[in-house]
Image: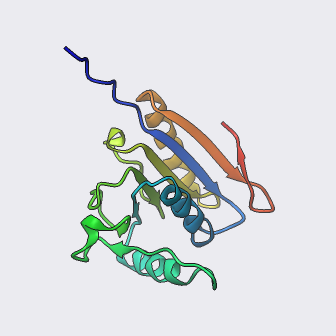
Amino acid sequence: MAVAAETDMAEILFFHLQSRPLEQVLPTIVDRALSRGQKVVVEVSSQERLSVIDDHLWTYADESFLPHVTALEADAPSNPVVLTTQAHNPNAAAVRVCADGVRIPDAMDAYERVVLIFDGDDPEALDAAREDWKKARASGHAASYWQQDEAGRWEKKA
């Protein structure tokens, strides 16, 4: 009788924004996941921010855009990128991006990768990220912490 394979723990990545806003880094993070063949769900804290991100992903570069839908659209389950304001996974995504004040999910194991993007200039966001870091580490997940340098490049700090 075959033994079921062990479930891998989610990889948790913490991205500390300092020199560039969410709108500048999110397209790259989503594009990298898509290039690995992974579906992505992006959760933000409000409908207003969702609308801003939704518009931005269509227009962030003259030569490129990221096709996506919001969770309210009928074809969300079949779409590779879904934007939401809720803690659900409408497209069975492997990657969850938590941004704009959203905390990492309790069900981290439901994903291959969870990405927390937080504003380094917001003391409340820093405190929440520290709590989430402790939560991820205490759960046994592989966690890495990335901080932007002055030029906007990511440096691994932990």
Tally of numbered discs: 0
Task: Report whether 125 appears left or right of 120.
Answer: left
**Is residue 137 visible from the viewing direction of this image?**
yes
The residue at the far right in this view is: 151
Q: Is residue 73 left or right of residue 82?
A: left
* Position above or below: 29 against 21: above
x%, y% of residue 154?
71, 53
Q: Is residue 131 visible?
A: no
Query: Can you name the residue that lies furthest to the front here?
Result: 1
Which quarter of the figure is the C terminus placed in? top right
Q: Between residue 88 and residue 27, name the one nearer to us.
A: 27
The structure residue drawn at horizontal position 42% and vertical position 58%, both measured from the top left corner, is 102
Q: Quadrant of residue 67?
A: bottom left
Residue most extreme to the top: 1
Left or right: residue 37 compared with residue 149 = left
Measured from the top left, where is residue 26 in percent x and y?
55, 65
Q: Residue at x 25, y 17 (%)?
A: 3
